[in-house]
Each structure stands twice: as structure tokens, then as C-alpha cells.
Amino acid sequence: MIPEKEFLWTIGDLKWILFALAGLTVAYIFYRLYERAQLWKLGQPADRLGNPITRGIAFSRLLITQGYGHEKFLRDRYGGLMHLLIFLGASMLFLGTAVGTIEEEFLYPLEHQGVLEWPIGNWYLYSSLAWDIGGLMALAGLTMAIFRRSAIGKPHHPGLLDDKIILTLAIILIFQGFGLEGLRQLGQTSFGIEYLDHPDWAIWSPGGFAFAAFFYEFVGIRADTAETIYRGLWWAHSLTVLGSLLYAAATLSKFSHTWISPANWFFRNLEPRGKLQAIPNLETRETFGAATLTDFTWKQLMDGDACTRCSRCTDNCPANITGKTLSPMMVIQNLKGYVGSYGNALYKAGGDESKVDEKLIMAPAGEVVDEEDLWSCVTCGACMEACPVFIEHVPTIVEMRRALVMNEGRLPETAEAALRSLETRGHPWSGMSRTRTEWAEGLDVPLISEVENPEDLEVLYWVGCAASMEDRSMRIARATGRILINAGIKFAILGDEESCTGDPARRIGMEYLFQLQAMQNVETLDRYGVKTIVTTCPHCFNTLSNEYPQFGGNYQVMHHTQYLQSLVADGRLTLDKTREGPTFGTVTYHDPCYLGRHNGVYDAPREVADAIPGINKLTEMEMHRNRAFCCGAGGGHMWMEDGPGHEKINHRRTHHAIDAGADVIAVACPFCAQMFEDGVRVTGQDENMRVLDLSEMIVQTIDD
Ligand code: SF4
Ligand code: SF4
């Protein structure tokens, strides 16, 4: 006999009532999404539909790598496996229901008329098995979720009532499903009682078979009662499914991420992560940054609804890890609450704030998000890298800093001093009296103003403020200069014509000063016809390559590690591994955030390190490459003091190097060098550990 089942057994035409209710539920979901989208539209424009082909390809790739591959989720093994089990299990159940409905409504009738031979036969058994495996996988994932919330609770991951409701509903649904299958196996159908007459069919649904056995052997349910209970449970199950969807749509609960998060993948930023958007029309604006909800872009307002509250961002945030109250997850969640309260009221008032309840009117920076949290951020991008739904925390945080700094003049005193120095002296260090060429004394480093045909230069060496004038970092500039001379590169520097790129000003939130710096530097670079720039500092590298095009400055920009790697590869810089010379012992390379995570440069510095003679062993720290832990200097923190009572980020990172057994911390950024020098001193490692830029290591192994 050919295995077959009656899909909507005993329900008959009542199914049309369910189909109608399902249609209404789907319509309500779309209505709620439309309604919410009206709140997002209160925000400023953001081009997230441009480059549709590139965007479509990027989205498809994410569907495979993040959706089915769970690449980011699985970086947290427990949480990733938990989510994967729920995701795959629920997908199989959903598909099973859809396929079953199609079978019942379209394929079986055709088969019974002799038009089709498929799908009757073993197909039904295989689909039953797949369905049960899906249910069991989802159940395993949900059990892990309950255990995680009850036994491995995290202080910054509050177990909200919503989580409990969703988990409870999901578990009820799965048990209802197994119960229904068990009752169906006990019922009298045109093929007999499956549990008794065709156990070889029934066992293909192991969950249902177990329930059938339990009902039959222990509860004493027989065919007549099975049918009655089945009918009641079928309606309960169907209404629980629809009720869960209605709950998710009405409250935009965590479950709604299944609809909004994939949309967030589609609308994600395709530009380099380190690039911040310019404030347009600076001269004519009255307010700057995110002074109120409507100052955020629609995408920033949407981010909150896409957030799944998984806390991966906060778990990877160096500020949070070292004890600050900043939680990037709560920044996004608080903004979501703000959209739901003030945004909703503003929308209903037709955009007229005077009609909005005063209690709902709040400033994003300071009232919705704590001011101290905004200043704790080092803009390292670890949160954005960790986020599986590609939420963009850093631009949102900087937007609120802009409001504080430019509208109200509220910023930490140390940051203010750095900006004042930048404005008056062209660099952010107060109390520094060096010129921009002292580091090159005794070296044959030409000034571009003295070069006859500057267009013929191979590169302009952009030294940067730190490497030009700060004592420790000047050694890096000197090393780089000596290497360029050794390799016979036609290069020059701007000298006193170089001014800060403006990176600290932009990250602190003083966009006006940044734009002045950018325009001045672009004018200088263009005057000399500069085409290729090599930078010491990853912050200069990021700003010159990603942000200066906003002001008409388009150059090929390379970080010095990239350039050194190309010189080695081209044979212009010879590093002899067999030569006798200094030994560096065990070396660990630290990825600077603005070179690695923000710009994806991971391999070039490692290839350089690999080529340096005298390294016994290259080792990686606990967090490296895209997951590297910040040195603590980004986002203007090079000049800002951490509040008392907090562990310093650079001290934590130095411990990572100590744990890796490093004799040398190899760096590629003058800020990192200074932060590690401090870390090595404070941790008492001065005798055992050195901090060296890769260029400083190379220069020790070459002859001038
Ligand atoms: S950018 Fe870095 S410091 Fe700022 S919130 Fe994200 S992870 Fe935390
Ligand atoms: S912002 Fe992203 S990483 Fe952070 S909680 Fe939300 S979804 Fe998770």
C-alpha cells in the first residue's frame, strides 16, 4: 500500500475560516510595518537604494553567509548554535506547512484524478521526518535560550517579559504540533489507524509517534476521542500561530526582527565603515547633529526596530568590557523607545511638536542616551562588526556628539583643549612646540615645495601630527623616512604645510572644524598635484581616503604597512632573513581599528611582519583581525581622560599581549604605540616587552 495521510484530517471546509484569518493576520502585519515606516520617514534622507545591482549582490551574499551560514552569529558559539537551531527548525516547520498545504490543496487532487503520480508515496514519509526534525531542532534551540536567560544571565542583557512571552509561545506551538501529529496517528482514516495499522509509516514522524504512544498507552486515547481532541487542538494551534504573529506585529516585539532585520541587510551601508557623512550646508544651518528625532536619518530610526537585543555589540564593546556604562545595544534600544513614544506622537500631531505631550519631548543626546556614554565611545566599530543585522552604531553616536558639541558646546574639557589647539595650531596637542620637520633632521627628506616637478613624485609621505611632533611617535616617522630613502623612492613631505586631517574634530563632533581642515588640506594637496599618499597613521589614512572625496580630494591613499608590503613584494625593499642582526623574539601584531575593522586591511601588516628578519615567532592575541580589541585612543580619546574608577582600555589590551607571551607588540599606528607604551609601563612589563612600529622593526634590519 502506498503511504499517504489526510493532511487536514477532520477539519474539512472549516479550513477556509483559518485561511481567511491567516489572510487578515498577514494584512495586519503589513499594516503595522507600513505604520512604523511612517515613523522612520520622519527622519532625514539617506541613500540606501542607490547601486541596486551591487546592493542586490551584497544582500544575496548576506542571505547565504549570515542567514544560512550564520557567520556572525556563530562567533558566539553558544548563542550562534542556539539561533541556528531555532532558525533552521522554524524554517523547516514553515516550509513543511507551506508544502503540506500545497500538497493537500493542489497536488493530491491531481493525483487522485490520475493527472500526477507524484507526490504520493514515500514523499509523505520523508516530509514527515523533515517536519519532525525541524520541530526537534527548534525545541533544542529554545531550550538553550531558556537556559541562557536563566542560568547564564548577563547584567546588560535584561530578560524582558517579551523574551519570556516569545519563548513560551514558541514552545507551546511545537508541543501542539507534536500532539496533533500523535492524535492524527491514533485516528480512524480511510487508510486505517496509522499508529496501529501502519507503524512503519508512523515512525517516520518520531515526535508524533512518541506522542501517539504516550496518548495510547498511558492516557488511553482511542480513535473516537482522538478525533474530537484533534479538532480542538488543531484550532488551538492555529489560533496560537496567528495570535503570536499578531502579538509580534502589535508590539513590534523581538520576533518582528524576522521581518525587519533582513530589510536592514538590504539597506545596509555599502561604503567603508570608517567614513562619516558630512553635515551639508554648515554655514546656513541653525542646528547640527541629532538635536531631535527628525535629525536622524530614516535608516538610523529604522535600526532600532531591526535590533534583536542579542547584545553581541555590547559584549564586544571595549568601553563596556572595561566597566563603563556604555552599552551600544541600549543606545539603539533607547532610540527605538524614543521613536515609539515621541516619534509616534509627532507623527499623529502631523509633525507639529507644539501638539506633542511635553513629557515626550526629549533631547536624544543627554536625555534619551546618557551623555557620559556618548563620550565613552572610542568609535572602534567593534559593535558594528559584531552586529548580525548590520546596525550602524558609530555614525549614530557621532551624530549625537555633534548635537552636544556644536549646539550646546558641551564636551569633556580635555576634548575641548584638543579642539582649541587644533584650531589655533593645526594639531591637537596643547603644549607641543616642535615643528613638523624636526623628526627628519639629518635625513635627506625633501619638502614638496622644494621639489622641481612635484607631479613626478612617486608618493607624498603624509606624516601626521603624532609622528611629526610627539616624541615617541617621531621615531616612527624617522624609521619610515629612512626606509623610503633606502628603497630609492621619489617622495617628499609637506612639512609645515601639512595640517591635521581633522579626524579628531570629526569624531569628537566638531564638524565645522573638520571641514575647515579638510578644505585647507585638499587645497594644498591639489596645488602640488598630489596623486598618491602614504600615511603613518591609520586615522589619517581613513580620513584622506574615505572622507576627503566629500571635499573634492581624490587620491590614492596607502597606509605605510601597505606601501612597505608592496615594496617588499616588488623587490624594492630587501629584507634578508639570513642576516645576523637584532632579534625580536615572539612578536604579536595589534590591528589598529581604523586600519583593520574600519578599512579591512589585515593582511599587509602581517605580510610585512612575516618578512622581517629576527622574529622567532609571530603570534596572535586573543582578539585580533576583525575582532581586535581597541587600544583605547580612537574617537578623540587620545586626548580625553577616562573617568576615574574605570579600567583603561589600553591596559586591558596590554594584558592580551602579555597573555600571548609577546616580547614585542608590533603596531602600525602612533596612537597605538603611545597607548601600549603606557600599558607596558603600568603593567610592569618595561623590562620584558617592547612596543615597536613595523617600520621601526624594519629599519633595525637594513643598512642605510
Ligand atoms: S564603537 Fe567601540 S566603543 Fe563605541 S560603542 Fe561601538 S564597540 Fe563600544
Ligand atoms: S545592535 Fe545588533 S548586535 Fe547589538 S543587540 Fe541589536 S542586533 Fe544585537
Image: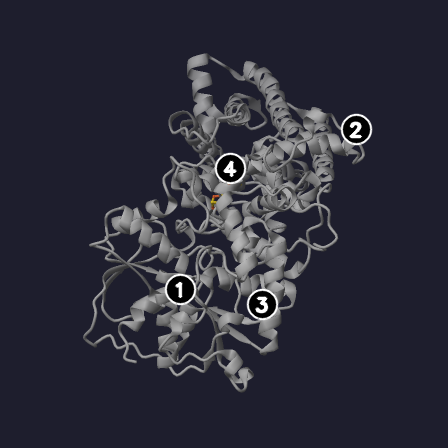
Disc nearer the start of the sequence (3/2): 2
Which residue is denoted by mark 2 in the rendering? 355
Spatial CA distance of label 4 from label 1 is: 36 Å
Answer yes or no: do the residues labelled 4 and 1 have beta carbons within 8 Å? no
Q: Name the residue: 39% across, 70% down.
A: 439
Residue 372's disc is: 4
Residue 521's disc is: 3
| Mark 4 close to ligand 1, CB under 8 Å | no
Which quarter of the figure is the C terminus placed in?
bottom left
Relative vertical location of residue 248 with respect to residue 188 in this rendering, above or below: below
> Alpha-carbon neighbours of circle 4 within 10 Å: few (<14), some, or many (≥20)?
some
Tag 2: amino acid: Lys
Residue 603's disc is: 1
Q: Position of residue 149 (x, y in %)?
A: 43, 28
Tag 4: amino acid: Glu
Tag 1: amino acid: Asp
> Alpha-carbon neighbours of circle 2 within 10 Å: few (<14), some, or many (≥20)?
few
Q: Name the residue: 37% across, 78% down.
A: 443
Figure colour scheme: one colour
Identify the image quadrant of residue 692. Answer: bottom left
Circle 4: element type? helix
| Mark 3 close to ligand 1, CB under 8 Å | no
Spatial CA distance of label 3 from label 4 is: 32 Å
Circle 3: element type? helix
Q: Position of residue 542 (x, y in %)?
A: 51, 61
| Nearest the eye: 235 or 396 | 396
Tag 3: amino acid: Asn
